[in-house]
Image: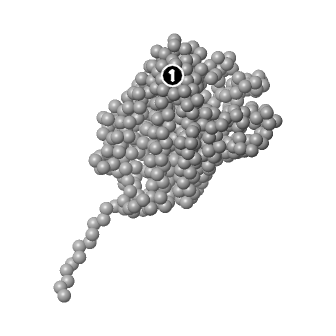
Amino acid sequence: MSTATLEPRVHAPRNYLNADYGWKSWLFTLDHKRIALLYLVSITFFFIIGGSFAVLMRIQLVDPQGAIVQPETYNKLFTLHGVVMIFFFLIPSIPAVLGNFLVPLMVGARDLAFPKLNLLSWYIYIVGGLFTLYSAIAGGVDTGWTFYTPYSSTYSNTQVTAVAIGVFITGFSSILTGLNFIVTIHKMRAPGLTWFRMPLFLWATYATSIIMVLGTPVLAITIFLLALEHLFHVGIFSPALGGDPLLFQHLFWFYSHPAVYIMILPAMGVVSEIIACFARKRIFGYKIVAFSSVAIAVLGFLVWGHHMFVTGQSVYAGIIFSLLSFLVAIPSAIKVFNWTATLYKGSISFDAPMLYAMGFIGLFTMGGLTGLFLASLATDVHLNGTYFVVAHFHYIMVGGAVMGYLGGIHFWWPKISGRKYPNGWAALAAAIIFIGFNLTFFPQFVLGYLGMPRRYAFYPAEFQVLNVMSSAGATVLGVGYLIPLIYLFWSMRYGPIAEPNPWGATGLEWKTPSPPPTENFTEIPVVTEEAYAYAEEEAGHE
């Protein structure tokens, strides 16, 4: 028998994308990066569902007498749009996708502190989503996403219970995710990664996690009590049963206003990373920006009453909530001023992530300034319940949170997928989204100022021009969202191979291959410098 020298096989580097094959390896994975991709696919699905409801609403409002549906169906459309987009897209988008992927890499760990809880949080999210989708198929719910009592608990004959169960279940996903992040950031940081060497994305994620862990149980028990009253007519919120509807609003907004910061704080962290990278500078006032994230998380729990200025609550309570609402704007303004100062004399490159970050700053600033009108008792009486509130909310949530989410996806996409995307198409998409967004929602400020109430299927004919502008803008905005979906999917197969650090950024995540190995690091790294050490590049530019 002859013998021959066996050549050693050359294997592709083992990473989370090619480590295993088959759907079972994904559904039972404990790898935080794969779980992040599971969330990415799920959240994109719910974004499409929620966006479809919005499209139907804008078609309805093209004509003053309504174009396609009856008022009862329109009530179900805006309710499901709000429920799906808030609880199943906006709240989990950046923490569940970018947070899951990046937190272990940024702290220099091989995974999150509790990998099994991480996978469980995704399954809980899916189960909650299935209950909500069932409610849509079974006839929908017409209460509005705020579920105001006593209508939701006593009088509505739609699928309130199914939606309530879905939101209740999904809340546990947020709690587990926040707990995982807090423990990981506290206990698993690499040697030398002190609190003031952490990237600002970690500070924002940490502050967000505090809100998720402390605030979500309040919403969960509130929704549970709502379902209890709806099913068994226990007197909790309905006056007909001896309850108090204002109690529901206090409990609901105690969570739901901090939930705004669950949506926006992670986007602020993303923008800090992008601004520093593409300006080639340290973040101006790093510690102030870091502490402002914590300040937003703390103050966010103290301002829920500004949603209730016209409910009959105490005038003195209204004054206090108004002052606190002005106060919570200060740490947000600090971030905007410090980002602007970071850009000053920076060596700025206008790649797609930077365009999204600058779009975030402009749209978020507009949303924040208009929020001051709603924090003032006198102007809120006129503007409450009008399209001014809709426009303000969307400038913060869609203009802010979604722009930050898309900016983060584009910034870390080479690291996530190991592939590059066409930057020209990405820049075009960012411009289309910015233009389409303003065309959609700026007319709604004018509509609200003129007195058009929100949640109405019909409206006076004099408002038609502005509504047509808004619907046309929604079409442009939809095209802007569709373009990234196409080229990012294309890039996973045909995009150029990405090097470990295509942007020349700082941070531990950029010191791994693209995509990272399954274990992230062969050896736990040691951190010896601050978060944004761009001094050499800046000096070279000067």
**Closer to us: 39 or 285:** 39
Residue at the (38%, 57%) spot, across then down: 17
Relative to 244, is 384 above or below? above
Where residue 71 appears, as percent x and y from the top left, is 57, 26
- Model colouring: one colour
Q: Amino acid at mark 1?
A: Gly
State whether residue 476 appears in this view. Answer: yes
In front here: 202 or 428?
428
- Would you place residue 185 above or below residue 315 in this image? below
Choose top left, top right, bottom left or bottom right for residue 353. Answer: top left
Label 1: how many residues lie within 10 Å, few (<14), some (14-19) or many (20+)?
some
* Residue 299: % across, % down: 66, 35
Q: Nearer the viewer, residue 538 or 418?
A: 418
Q: Which residue is located at x 62 percent, y 19 percent?
A: 383
Residue most toward the top? 462
Residue at figure coordinates x 71%, y 41% from the top left: 230
Q: Residue furthest right?
A: 242
Instruction: Provide residue 527's location: percent of width, then percent of height.
Output: 48, 53
The quadrant of the image that shows the N terminus is bottom left
Q: Residue at x 51, y 22 (%)?
A: 66
**Can you give x and y, in whole percent of width and height, for residue 42 in the image?**
48, 47
Location of the C terminus by quadrant is top left
Q: Secondary structure at mark 1?
A: loop
> Residue furthest toward the left?
2
- Numbered marks: total: 1
Q: Nearer the viewer, residue 137 or 223?
A: 137
| Horizontal side of residue 318 vs 371, given as left or right | right
Report which residue position mark 1 lands on. 66
> Considering only vertical position in the picture, is 372 above or below 165?
above
Residue 175 can be seen in this image: no
